[in-house]
Amino acid sequence: MRIDIVSVLPELLESPLGHSIIHRAQKKGLAEIVVHPLRDYTHDKRRTVDDYAFGPDAGMVLKIQPIFECFQELMAERTYDEVIYTSPDGELLTQQLANQLSTKKNLLILCGHYKGIDHRVRENMVTREISIGDYVLSGGELAAAVIVDSVVRLIPGVLSDETSALTDSFQDNLLAPPVYTRPADFNGWKVPDILLSGNFAEIEKWQHKQAIERTKLLRPGLIDPKDE
Ligand code: ADE
Protein backbone atom coordinates (compact mmCIF):
# COMPACT_ATOMS: atom_id res chain seq x y z
CA MET A 1 0.00 0.00 0.00
CA ARG A 2 1.14 3.52 -0.75
CA ILE A 3 -0.02 6.43 1.41
CA ASP A 4 0.76 10.03 0.52
CA ILE A 5 0.13 12.62 3.20
CA VAL A 6 -0.03 16.35 2.46
CA SER A 7 0.65 18.54 5.47
CA VAL A 8 1.53 22.06 6.59
CA LEU A 9 3.36 20.61 9.60
CA PRO A 10 5.21 17.53 8.30
CA GLU A 11 7.44 17.46 11.42
CA LEU A 12 4.40 16.43 13.47
CA LEU A 13 4.15 13.20 11.46
CA GLU A 14 7.80 12.15 11.70
CA SER A 15 7.69 10.44 15.05
CA PRO A 16 4.36 8.55 14.82
CA LEU A 17 5.23 7.22 11.36
CA GLY A 18 8.87 6.51 12.13
CA HIS A 19 8.48 3.99 14.93
CA SER A 20 7.27 0.57 15.88
CA ILE A 21 4.79 -1.29 13.68
CA ILE A 22 4.40 1.45 11.06
CA HIS A 23 8.15 1.71 10.70
CA ARG A 24 8.45 -2.07 10.42
CA ALA A 25 5.72 -2.19 7.76
CA GLN A 26 7.72 0.31 5.70
CA LYS A 27 10.98 -1.58 6.19
CA LYS A 28 9.28 -4.80 5.09
CA GLY A 29 8.05 -3.00 1.95
CA LEU A 30 4.39 -3.59 2.88
CA ALA A 31 3.62 0.11 3.19
CA GLU A 32 5.20 3.13 1.60
CA ILE A 33 4.31 6.36 3.37
CA VAL A 34 5.44 9.68 1.93
CA VAL A 35 4.81 13.06 3.53
CA HIS A 36 4.61 16.10 1.26
CA PRO A 37 5.11 19.56 2.84
CA LEU A 38 2.40 21.81 1.42
CA ARG A 39 4.75 24.81 1.51
CA ASP A 40 6.82 23.18 -1.23
CA TYR A 41 3.94 23.98 -3.60
CA THR A 42 3.86 27.72 -2.98
CA HIS A 43 5.51 30.28 -5.25
CA ASP A 44 6.03 33.31 -3.02
CA LYS A 45 9.08 34.08 -0.93
CA ARG A 46 7.23 33.55 2.36
CA ARG A 47 5.82 30.21 1.20
CA THR A 48 2.29 31.27 2.12
CA VAL A 49 -0.25 28.46 2.41
CA ASP A 50 -3.16 30.35 3.97
CA ASP A 51 -5.15 33.54 3.47
CA TYR A 52 -7.96 35.49 5.14
CA ALA A 53 -11.41 33.92 4.93
CA PHE A 54 -14.00 35.74 2.81
CA GLY A 55 -16.75 37.13 5.02
CA PRO A 56 -16.83 38.57 8.52
CA ASP A 57 -15.18 35.69 10.42
CA ALA A 58 -11.61 36.14 11.53
CA GLY A 59 -9.10 33.43 10.81
CA MET A 60 -6.93 32.01 8.10
CA VAL A 61 -7.95 29.37 5.62
CA LEU A 62 -5.72 27.05 3.56
CA LYS A 63 -5.55 28.25 -0.04
CA ILE A 64 -6.55 26.10 -3.01
CA GLN A 65 -3.52 26.73 -5.22
CA PRO A 66 -0.78 24.84 -3.32
CA ILE A 67 -3.15 21.93 -2.60
CA PHE A 68 -4.26 21.79 -6.22
CA GLU A 69 -0.69 21.81 -7.54
CA CYS A 70 0.44 19.19 -5.04
CA PHE A 71 -2.53 16.93 -5.89
CA GLN A 72 -1.91 17.37 -9.62
CA GLU A 73 1.70 16.27 -9.22
CA LEU A 74 0.75 13.25 -7.10
CA MET A 75 -2.18 12.25 -9.31
CA ALA A 76 0.04 12.30 -12.39
CA GLU A 77 2.03 9.49 -10.76
CA ARG A 78 -0.80 7.23 -9.56
CA THR A 79 -4.54 6.85 -9.20
CA TYR A 80 -5.84 7.14 -5.65
CA ASP A 81 -8.56 4.87 -4.30
CA GLU A 82 -9.50 7.55 -1.80
CA VAL A 83 -8.56 11.19 -1.24
CA ILE A 84 -9.11 11.66 2.47
CA TYR A 85 -9.46 14.95 4.32
CA THR A 86 -9.12 14.87 8.11
CA SER A 87 -11.83 16.94 9.75
CA PRO A 88 -13.98 16.88 12.89
CA ASP A 89 -17.05 16.98 10.62
CA GLY A 90 -16.11 13.81 8.75
CA GLU A 91 -17.42 10.27 9.23
CA LEU A 92 -16.13 8.69 12.41
CA LEU A 93 -13.11 6.39 12.08
CA THR A 94 -14.16 2.89 13.14
CA GLN A 95 -12.48 -0.50 12.94
CA GLN A 96 -14.80 -1.29 10.05
CA LEU A 97 -13.62 1.78 8.12
CA ALA A 98 -9.97 0.95 8.92
CA ASN A 99 -10.54 -2.59 7.59
CA GLN A 100 -12.05 -1.17 4.42
CA LEU A 101 -9.16 1.27 3.86
CA SER A 102 -6.56 -1.45 4.52
CA THR A 103 -7.63 -3.22 1.31
CA LYS A 104 -6.82 -0.18 -0.86
CA LYS A 105 -3.71 0.28 -2.95
CA ASN A 106 -3.18 4.05 -2.91
CA LEU A 107 -4.46 6.55 -0.36
CA LEU A 108 -3.95 10.30 -0.34
CA ILE A 109 -4.53 12.10 2.96
CA LEU A 110 -4.79 15.86 3.23
CA CYS A 111 -4.31 17.04 6.80
CA GLY A 112 -6.85 19.63 7.87
CA HIS A 113 -5.99 23.03 9.23
CA TYR A 114 -7.41 24.49 12.41
CA LYS A 115 -9.54 27.11 10.64
CA GLY A 116 -10.31 24.94 7.66
CA ILE A 117 -9.43 24.81 4.00
CA ASP A 118 -11.03 26.47 1.02
CA HIS A 119 -14.26 24.48 0.69
CA ARG A 120 -13.79 24.01 -3.06
CA VAL A 121 -11.04 21.48 -2.28
CA ARG A 122 -13.53 19.42 -0.29
CA GLU A 123 -16.22 19.76 -2.95
CA ASN A 124 -14.07 18.88 -5.92
CA MET A 125 -11.05 16.83 -4.89
CA VAL A 126 -11.74 15.02 -1.63
CA THR A 127 -13.59 11.68 -1.77
CA ARG A 128 -13.84 10.98 1.94
CA GLU A 129 -13.74 13.08 5.11
CA ILE A 130 -12.74 11.32 8.29
CA SER A 131 -12.93 12.40 11.94
CA ILE A 132 -11.11 10.50 14.67
CA GLY A 133 -13.57 11.61 17.37
CA ASP A 134 -15.92 14.31 18.55
CA TYR A 135 -13.32 16.78 19.70
CA VAL A 136 -11.28 19.40 17.87
CA LEU A 137 -7.53 19.03 17.32
CA SER A 138 -5.30 21.95 16.35
CA GLY A 139 -4.55 20.34 13.02
CA GLY A 140 -5.17 17.16 11.07
CA GLU A 141 -1.67 15.67 11.40
CA LEU A 142 -2.37 13.66 14.54
CA ALA A 143 -5.65 12.48 13.02
CA ALA A 144 -3.78 11.39 9.87
CA ALA A 145 -1.28 9.48 12.02
CA VAL A 146 -4.14 7.72 13.82
CA ILE A 147 -5.79 6.78 10.52
CA VAL A 148 -2.51 5.49 9.06
CA ASP A 149 -1.71 3.47 12.19
CA SER A 150 -5.15 1.86 12.34
CA VAL A 151 -4.98 0.96 8.63
CA VAL A 152 -1.36 -0.12 8.15
CA ARG A 153 -1.38 -2.63 11.02
CA LEU A 154 -4.20 -4.46 9.20
CA ILE A 155 -2.19 -5.04 6.01
CA PRO A 156 -1.46 -8.78 5.82
CA GLY A 157 2.09 -9.50 6.99
CA VAL A 158 2.53 -6.34 9.06
CA LEU A 159 1.66 -7.92 12.40
CA SER A 160 3.27 -11.13 13.53
CA ASP A 161 0.93 -14.01 14.41
CA GLU A 162 1.05 -13.43 18.11
CA THR A 163 -0.08 -9.82 17.75
CA SER A 164 -2.67 -10.69 15.12
CA ALA A 165 -5.26 -8.00 14.45
CA LEU A 166 -7.99 -10.63 14.53
CA THR A 167 -7.94 -10.64 18.33
CA ASP A 168 -8.21 -6.86 18.62
CA SER A 169 -11.00 -5.12 20.43
CA PHE A 170 -13.76 -4.04 17.97
CA GLN A 171 -12.75 -6.56 15.30
CA ASP A 172 -15.99 -8.47 16.01
CA ASN A 173 -17.77 -5.59 17.77
CA LEU A 174 -16.56 -6.92 21.11
CA LEU A 175 -13.91 -5.56 23.44
CA ALA A 176 -10.88 -7.83 23.84
CA PRO A 177 -10.83 -10.21 26.83
CA PRO A 178 -8.30 -9.50 29.62
CA VAL A 179 -4.77 -10.82 29.14
CA TYR A 180 -2.11 -11.76 31.71
CA THR A 181 1.54 -12.78 31.79
CA ARG A 182 3.94 -14.30 34.32
CA PRO A 183 4.04 -14.53 37.28
CA ALA A 184 0.76 -16.42 37.77
CA ASP A 185 0.64 -15.10 41.34
CA PHE A 186 1.90 -11.59 42.08
CA ASN A 187 1.79 -10.98 45.82
CA GLY A 188 -1.56 -12.78 45.99
CA TRP A 189 -3.05 -11.23 42.82
CA LYS A 190 -3.81 -14.33 40.80
CA VAL A 191 -4.27 -15.07 37.12
CA PRO A 192 -7.64 -16.82 36.53
CA ASP A 193 -7.13 -20.59 36.95
CA ILE A 194 -8.70 -21.38 33.58
CA LEU A 195 -5.80 -19.69 31.74
CA LEU A 196 -3.32 -22.03 33.44
CA SER A 197 -5.39 -25.15 32.69
CA GLY A 198 -3.95 -25.91 29.24
CA ASN A 199 -7.49 -26.66 28.00
CA PHE A 200 -7.59 -24.42 24.93
CA ALA A 201 -11.23 -25.07 24.05
CA GLU A 202 -12.33 -24.03 27.54
CA ILE A 203 -9.96 -21.06 27.49
CA GLU A 204 -11.50 -19.83 24.24
CA LYS A 205 -15.01 -20.19 25.68
CA TRP A 206 -13.94 -18.25 28.78
CA GLN A 207 -12.35 -15.51 26.65
CA HIS A 208 -15.48 -15.11 24.55
CA LYS A 209 -17.66 -14.88 27.65
CA GLN A 210 -15.31 -12.28 29.14
CA ALA A 211 -15.38 -10.29 25.89
CA ILE A 212 -19.18 -10.22 25.94
CA GLU A 213 -19.35 -9.30 29.63
CA ARG A 214 -16.78 -6.52 29.31
CA THR A 215 -18.53 -5.11 26.24
CA LYS A 216 -21.93 -5.14 27.99
CA LEU A 217 -20.41 -3.41 30.99
CA LEU A 218 -18.10 -0.89 29.31
CA ARG A 219 -19.50 -0.30 25.79
CA PRO A 220 -23.06 -1.67 25.67
CA GLY A 221 -23.78 0.28 22.47
CA LEU A 222 -21.39 -1.97 20.52
CA ILE A 223 -23.52 -5.09 20.97
CA ASP A 224 -26.07 -5.68 18.27
CA PRO A 225 -29.35 -6.73 19.97
CA LYS A 226 -29.70 -9.41 17.25
CA ASP A 227 -26.58 -11.16 18.59
CA GLU A 228 -27.80 -11.39 22.17
N1 ADE B 1 -8.96 17.95 12.80
C1 ADE B 1 -9.31 18.58 13.92
N2 ADE B 1 -10.01 17.79 14.74
C2 ADE B 1 -10.12 16.60 14.11
C3 ADE B 1 -10.74 15.37 14.43
N3 ADE B 1 -11.40 15.19 15.58
N4 ADE B 1 -10.65 14.36 13.55
C4 ADE B 1 -10.01 14.54 12.38
N5 ADE B 1 -9.41 15.67 12.02
C5 ADE B 1 -9.46 16.70 12.87
Image (tube, helix red, strand yellow):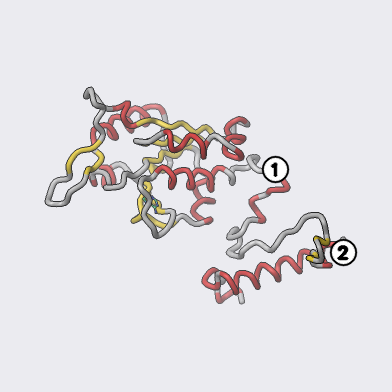
Q: Position of residue 63 (x, y in %)?
A: 23, 37
Q: Circle 2 sits in a helix, a strand or a loop, which is it?
A: loop
Q: Position of residue 8 (x, y in %)?
A: 34, 35
Q: Front-most of 187 and 24?
A: 187
Residue annotated with mark 1: 160
Q: CA distance from mark 2 to mark 1?
A: 25 Å
Residue 202 visible in the displayed image = no
Dot 2 or dot 1: first in sequence order is 1
Please tell me which residue is depicted at 28% across the width and 34% down the height of the picture. Answer: 68
The furthest residue to the right: 198
Q: Residues within 10 Å of mark 2 (few under 14, many from 20)?
A: few
The furthest residue to the front: 187
Q: Circle 1 sits in a helix, a strand or a loop, which is it?
A: loop
Report the amino acid beneath label 1. Ser
Task: Respond yes or no on whether mark 2 lies under 8 Å from ligand 1.
Answer: no
Q: Quadrant of residue 227?
A: bottom right
Q: Quadrant of residue 159?
A: top right
Number of numbered discs present? 2
The quadrant in which the C terminus is found is: bottom right
Please tell me which residue is depicted at 51% across the width and 51% down the height of the picture. Answer: 98
